[in-house]
Image (cartoon, rainbow, N blue to C red):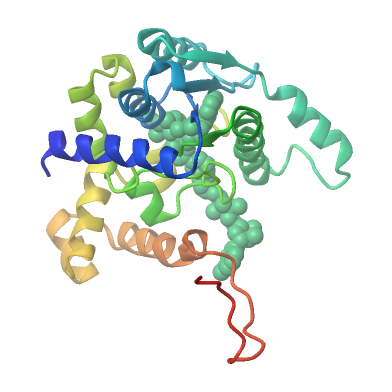
Amino acid sequence: MDIGKAKETIVKFIRESVKEAGCKGAVVGISGGIDSALTAYLCVEALGKENVLGVHLPEINLTPAEDVLDATEVAERLGIEFRTIDISGPLRAFMEAVPESGQDFRHANGNLKARVRMSILYYYANTMQRLVVGTGNKTELLLGYFTKYGDGGVDLEPIGDLYKTEVREMSRVIGVPQGIIEKAPSAGLWAGQTDEADLGITYETVDRFLEMLLEGERPQVAQNTLGMTPQQRDSVLARIHGNLHKRKAPPMPELDELRVSYITV
Ligand SMILES: Nc1ncnc2c1ncn2[C@@H]1O[C@H](COP(=O)(O)OP(=O)(O)OC[C@H]2O[C@@H]([n+]3cccc(C(=O)O)c3)[C@H](O)[C@@H]2O)[C@@H](O)[C@H]1O
Ligand SMILES: Nc1ncnc2c1ncn2[C@@H]1O[C@H](COP(=O)(O)OP(=O)(O)OP(=O)(O)O)[C@@H](O)[C@H]1O
Ligand SMILES: [Mg+2]
């Protein structure tokens, strides 16, 4: 992969997508992590700093102070417009309004956070005639390691064809702060969560595994070549297959094969 060439392709893609949509710029959720930092840098290169809004959406009692500082540093270095909005209020209101909700549902509550963030980003997109630019990378998209209609609820995915390891490479080239590049990736949905602990495998290994599968290698051979355990292989395959639905439009029944559903003129 020629990282310089890939960067130019992505920058052009962002510029053209925003133009084709007739929009005025981009809204990006900036977490303090590497994916959103790189995406913000690419958006600024494509659209200019005055056309990129960064929104940091911490939870006051959970988000590490380091993330707040890192997100702010990205925005300051880029010189973009920036908001920090605490999402604990909306989360509390949800918990109070929905009788079946509760603190025991860590997984559902984590996904709710991602969906609250998505709603806030779309509020800005609606009011400012902008697109919500996603930060999903190829590894996350292939594994389905994202919240459906949460961080997956976006208008475009500029870094969606970059493996996580390539995200790191491009981030070095474009000048993302070193501390952000070196920080352990985390969805930040609950205290102490890290991607690699969740996935049970390092990004270096899973990226190679996915690459080999896409090249047509058999899972067993890829597993042996990479020194993975059978459990790691099966868990990655289960994620790939179990989450395919996240990458498709919601299915609907075809009521009559002669009825056409798409207008082509
Ligand atoms: N076959 C099928 N066809 C159509 N829809 C299907 C389906 N199976 C489940 N579903 C639907 O999908 C739902 C499950 O999907 P979803 O709600 O996304 O939930 P789920 O995949 O269970 O959880 C999201 C995962 O992504 C991780 N995550 C989230 C956010 C950010 C990041 C990060 O890296 O930053 C990581 C998070 O830690 C967790 O492991 C089900 O409740 C159901 O509604
Ligand atoms: N606190 C937050 N404030 C704003 N956006 C957030 C926040 N947490 C998550 N997001 C959004 O959800 C996306 C998905 O999170 P994810 O953890 O995969 O990416 P990241 O935090 O940018 O990078 P890393 O994988 O290194 O943690 C983020 O890139 C960001 O757009
Ligand atoms: Mg993160």
Residue 187 visible in rendering: no
Q: Nearer the viewer, residue 146 or 185?
A: 146
In the figure, is residue 32 to the left or right of 105? Answer: left
Q: Nearer the viewer, residue 172 or 16?
A: 16
Check the image and report above or below for 74 versus 211: above
Residue 11 in the image, given as x and y percentages of width and height: 28, 34
Image label count: 0
Residue 182 in the image, given as x and y percentages of width and height: 28, 22
Which residue: 54% across, 64% down? 249
In the figure, is residue 145 to the left or right of 201? Answer: right
In the figure, is residue 243 to the left or right of 91? Answer: left
Quadrant in the picture for the N terminus: top left
Residue 56 in the image, given as x and y percentages of width and height: 54, 20
Which residue: 48% across, 24% down? 30
In the figure, is residue 153 to the left or right of 204? Answer: right
Check the image and report above or below for 177 versus 162: above
Residue 249 visible in rendering: yes
Which residue: 18% across, 70% down? 216
Q: Nearer the viewer, residue 208 or 79?
A: 79
Check the image and report above or below for 238 versus 12: below
Which residue: 52% across, 36% down? 132
Q: Nearer the viewer, residue 45 or 181?
A: 45
Residue 189 in the image, given as x and y percentages of width and height: 57, 34
